[in-house]
Image: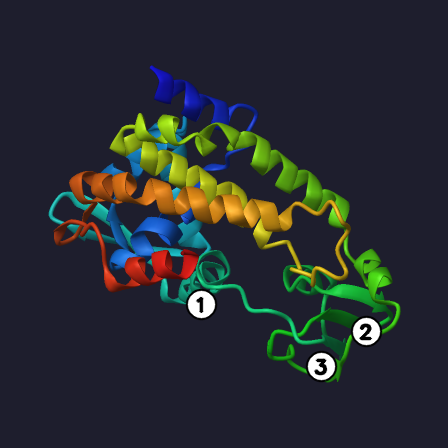
Amino acid sequence: MAEDGLIAGILDGLSLRSAAFIVTIYGDVVLPRGGVLWTGTLIEICERVGINESLVRTAVSRLVAARRLKGERAGRRSYYRLDASAQKEFAEAATLLYAPDIPAHGWQILHAPALSEDDAHRLRMGHLGGQVYIRPDRGQPAPRGAVLFHATDPETLPALAGYWDLSALQTRYLDMLSRFAGLRNAGRLHGLSDADALVARLLLVHVYRNVLLRDPRLPATVLPPDWKGAEARDLFRALYRDLTPKAERHIAARFEGTDGLLTETTPESTTRLAGIA
């Protein structure tokens, strides 16, 4: 079927780790609908992208050990909900994905002796040297123990991009644009089943999130003229909006929590869609 080929094209060559995809499912679908999902539903949706039951159960065990999911039982069924320790992480990712973009106002320059290299990378900071870092100023709080300075745009603005590996991010954005090019055709979107619309939306979120969480979101004045980040964001928002009616119809028909089928929409899912629009 045409839609089968469309999903297969998105999946072609995509390195899809079980635990990471389950995180995508919880972040995009489950979090706005109470945060808990039946294991059977999780297995069913993962099978559609080639992740079998054994891999799902192994990944869930690892996520429980990492305190990102927490198991519970109702009768003979097992359910997993977001662990309280993962709520902040999921909420921060959701803000980046679904909320309107916050423009930067100048720069933060931080002297952060206690900041590890891994934490600096996670916070998408540029390394100026020694214990000094830089990032666009969007009102983020300083890491513990850091001294924060605010700076306006310097005269050497274009040179600031050199403190981040933009080439790796550009490659990821180009891959995303190529991978989802087939979904740009409205006629092909119309032919998708409800289930495949949800799979396509989950894959869209998964691929985009994996690059967005690494992107420092530098001001346009710093970025190279052929930068694809804005184009990828526009594609994400347009496709997410167009896929959502069918995707959420499938959620309401097949996704089960402890109280039965999940609802098609919630105030949080509606807010997300409004933020994208």
Q: Tell me the tag on residue 146.
A: 3
Residue 11 x/y as whole percent: 49, 27
Count of numbered marks: 3
The residues bearing labels 3 and 1 have C-alpha atoms spaced at a distance of 21 Å
Amino acid type of the residue that numbered disc 1 sits on in the rendered structure: Lys
> With respect to residue 59, does 190 lie above or below?
above
Query: Residue at horizontal 70%, vertical 43%?
Result: 170
Query: Residue at horizontal 20%, vertical 50%?
Result: 264
Tell me which corner region of the image, top left, top right, bottom left or bottom right, holds residue 50: top left
The residues bearing labels 2 and 1 have C-alpha atoms spaced at a distance of 26 Å
> With respect to residue 4, does 152 lie above or below?
below
Question: Regarding mark 2 in the picture, which secondary structure is present there?
Answer: strand
Badge 1 is on which residue? Answer: 88
Left of 118 or right of it: where is 99? left
Label 2 packing within 10 angstroms: few (<14), some (14-19), many (20+)? some
Residue 192 x/y as whole percent: 31, 28
Residue 273 in sight = yes
Question: Regarding mark 3 in the picture, which secondary structure is present there?
Answer: loop
Label 1 packing within 10 angstroms: few (<14), some (14-19), many (20+)? few
Q: How is the image coloured?
A: rainbow
Residue 143 x/y as whole percent: 64, 77
Amino acid type of the residue that numbered disc 3 sits on in the rendered structure: Ala
Q: Tell me the tag on residue 132.
A: 2
Label 3 packing within 10 angstroms: few (<14), some (14-19), many (20+)? some
Along the viewing direction, whichever of 187 and 24 lies nearer the viewer? 187
Mark nearer the N terminus (2 vs 3): 2
